[in-house]
Image (cartoon, rainbow, N blue to C red):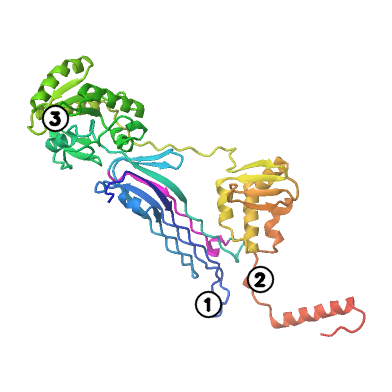
Amino acid sequence: MTTFVDRVELHVAAGNGGHGVASVMREKFKPLGGPDGGNGGRGGDVILVVDQDVTTLLEYHHHPHRKATNGQPGAGDHRSGKNGQDLVLPVPDGTVILDRAGNVLADLVGQGTTFIAGQGGRGGLGNAALASARRKAPGFALLGEPGEARDIVLELKTVADVALVGYPSAGKSSLISVLSAAKPKIADYPFTTLVPNLGVVTAGSTVYTIADVPGLIPGASQGKGLGLEFLRHVERCEVLVHVLDTATLESERDPVSDLDTIEAELALYGGLENRPRVVVLNKVDIPDGKDLADMIRGDLEERGYRVFEVSAVARLGLKELSFALAEIVATARAAKPVQEATRIVIRPQAVDDTGFTVTEEAENLYRVRGEKPERWVRQTDFSNDEAVGYLADRLNRLGIEDALLKAGARTGDGVAIGPEDNAVVFDWEPTMAAGAEMLGRRGEDHRMEAPRPAAQRRRDRDAARDEADEEYDGFRPF
């Protein structure tokens, strides 16, 4: 059964915003007291946050679909809908967020680091919020926006200072078990270690973490063995430690060729050229191992490596190794630039930035793109003529009418607002600017007017009859 997963594809969906509501206040002696429709609630976000207690992505391997809750719709009496609850997903330290194309969206390092993977939709405004001096009784409300939905890839890269690399059964697990309190699985067969193991080492005043990377073999950078799957765990380490087996029983192998093979795989993987290297000749407690270590040590030092002869079983040479690694780690930490405080950069909108673009895509077809017009379209209830007229007014005030005229649009041309896969398309009429007027006196709801006296209603009725009698010759029944 899988117990360690360091790469998953996650499908996240933020919550949808709640719809606004169109409602009219009704009280005793005041049946039409004015609009009182509340706003819809905001949809919940999907948030990834680093949690030190989480060490694997196994949970998301079994349950890759995650969705936040929706916002609730508004109600009458100025009651706003409840906001959707944010969905917080804990991830291990060192998790990298990528899109499906492989572009890095975020690199989460450090306890509490967060990333909003999906933005919740805005709640729609109720008719109370849409009322104004010109629009006293709106008969419509805005719809809630859909939440952001997308597919992302989570990759775990171990956060460690030192990485132990080498062939299977070279003694990496044994070495980390005696240098730290880690308890990896140790056995006398290859590929005993199937997942990276982390341990904490204290050497004097320096405390650092050490990772045991599963065994590498020729072709690891192309996917053979376990190398390609776990080479990413080496990327964050400050120093690479080659653990070489000086007592190998395989006649076709020797420590120097093992070193060359692993270095070739690291070079093919890329990005590790400047990391300091240390060579550990393990199993020198065996006579043949000690003899071989003495033979090759000079050759390795001529190449520029610092060489240490150790025995994880007999615990020989461990103190010197741990303090040498601590020195390298401390030097690397000191060389890192001090992270400056986050600076807030304010970039005001340019005076000539309209916030939208109008492009002619084909003959008689124009496309409008922009954050505002696309959001307004999503919030419009197209089954309500008054809401459509309100959208027409907003688009005209934004300047889309003039932009279409400048682009050469004519009556009857198609206009698409939004991306190709999700656009609203309509036949354009230059009179679109008068959207409110086309629907009548939308802002002056007759229901809000004071009732006429009975005598006035009788006089109006009699006047209407007299006008009708003048239009017709002959008898007109009433």
Q: How many marks?
A: 3
Question: Residue at label 3?
Answer: 322
Q: Which mark is residue 442?
A: none
Q: CA distance from mark 2 to mark 3?
A: 86 Å
Q: Secondary structure at mark 2?
A: helix
CB within 8 Å, label 2 to label 3: no
What are the residue bounds of the magenta stretch?
111-131
Q: Quadrant of the C terminus?
A: bottom right
As rendered, which of 214 and 199 lies closer to the eye?
214
Task: Of the two numbered discs 2 and 3 on the same chain, state the one appearing first in sequence.
Answer: 3
Q: CA distance from mark 2 to mark 1?
A: 18 Å
As rendered, which of 218 and 29 lies closer to the eye?
218
Question: Residue at label 1?
Answer: 27
Quick one: label 1, few (<14), some, or many (20+) residues within 10 Å?
few
Q: Amino acid at mark 3?
A: Ser
Question: Residue at label 2?
Answer: 446
Q: Residue furthest right?
A: 473
- How far from the left and from the top, in percent, is residue 80? 46, 64
